Image: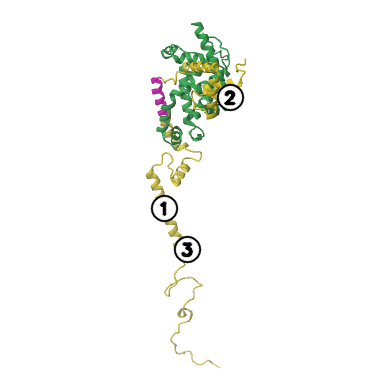
Chain colours: A yellow, B green
Amino acid sequence: MNTQPRDPQRLRALELSIQARREELPADDQRFLSEYLSAHPEVAEEAREMDLVVSELNPGPLPARPEFTAQLQATVAGWIRDDALARPRSASPEGWLAARWRGLLSGRGTPGVSPSTLLLGRSLAFYLGAACVLCAFLLLREPAQGPEVRTNDRAHTLTDDRTQPKERPSKPDLRGPRPK
Amino acid sequence: MVDPDVAAMLAFQRGDYDAFQDLVAAHTDSLISYFFFQCRDRQLAEDCCQDVWLKVFKSREDYQPRARFRTFLFRVARNHWIDRFRAQSRRPGETSLDADSEGSEPGGGPLGRLPSEGDDPETRALRSDAARIVARCLRRLPEEMREVYILAEIQELPYAEVAELLRIPVGTVKSRMFNAVRKLREITRGFDEES
């Protein structure tokens, strides 16, 4: 069944008059509507009639029953409780630990990460970093060369007193002359 | 201007449960209305409303602020409504859920075939109030007109948002709205003549 008015101008005017009940029309549409309705009083009358129908058939939002509101609040509180309990295990696809670590790094404070936890985490990260730097420095630095350094390293140059045999006190030859 | 509801949803995404509770408090009436004017069944509307909030709660990680929060919420609600109807219509041996005293209505659309009103005191009270009369009139509209009318007129969404939500051009929203109002005028005239 075709219910459209044959005149497209009239159709446009009626559509706009319904739309104008709820929202502000663009300037062009407003101008067209006022000009058309003033030139066509029968269409203006029809638009008024439609407006009346719509006004009568709008009871506004239906208020929820107080019992339902109370029940919904209790239900929502249950969802929240369950979610808060389950969240550490299923906070994200990467898992709880990854979420917490990301939260520590980004400082965004993912749910459940308190500011004190953030502070503690950052402090630990700082001191661990500092300890690593210190260890690396101690391990990689050049060993100091001193005159009294003793070493078992065979490559180390030994002093003369250890390379030269010690002079022993000469003993008298008691064997006598060799037989000829 | 930033939609404060979008900000609340983003806060909830970051773990602010109070923000979610605020959203529930602010938009539950709208959701109840949306479902009630679709099905005229208060209990079903409340069930659907709770289901929608659960979906929003569970899918918060996927939320992206592309539109106003209300647009997002009604999209979830609409999808839920369609899914619910599909699930119901697939059940074998299901009789028409629309078989109440008003009988079949022209152009009722598939989503109109949902449970009729029960006999609880709340529903009985609704029989005499404006919401029920409006719901009765809306039930006689084709589904696509009823949906546009509920969103644009009762929920007061701008046409552009209705178009975005339903994924149709704004011109189609205007046309459906116009046809819905014309048809409603005929329906109310019929009521006047009956009385």
User: What chain letter is assigned to the residue under label 1?
Assistant: A
User: In percent of the image, x 43 and y 29: which residue is there?
Assistant: B23
Q: Are marks 2 and 1 on the same chain?
A: no
Of the pair B136 and B111, the residue shown nearer to us: B136
Q: Are marks 2 and 1 in contact (CB under 8 Å)?
A: no
- Rendered location of residue B128, percent (x, y): 43, 11
Q: Amino acid at mark 2?
A: Thr
Q: Kindly tell me whether residue B83 is visible in this rendering.
A: no
User: What chain letter is assigned to the residue under label 2?
Assistant: B
- Cα–Cα span, label 2 and label 1: 62 Å
Q: Which residue is mark 1?
A: A126
Q: Secondary structure at mark 2?
A: helix
Q: Residues within 10 Å of mark 2 (few under 14, many from 20)?
A: few
Residue A70 colored in magenta in the image: yes
Q: Point out the stretch of residues depicted in magenta.
A: A65-78
Which of the image's four quarters has the C terminus of chain A?
Answer: bottom right
Q: Residues within 10 Å of mark 3 (few under 14, many from 20)?
A: few
Q: Which residue is mark 2?
A: B172
- Rendered location of residue B75, percent (x, y): 52, 27
Task: Establish if A168 lies above or below B137.
Answer: below
User: Residue A140: which numbered mark, if any?
Assistant: 3
- Cα–Cα span, label 3 and label 1: 21 Å
- Cα–Cα span, label 2 and label 3: 77 Å
Q: Amino acid at mark 1?
A: Phe
User: From the viewer's perspective, is the residue at label 2 or at label 1 nearer?
Assistant: 2
Q: Amino acid at mark 3?
A: Leu
Of the pair A155 and A110, the residue shown nearer to us: A110
Q: Main secondary structure of the magenta part?
A: helix
- Rendered location of residue A127, percent (x, y): 40, 54
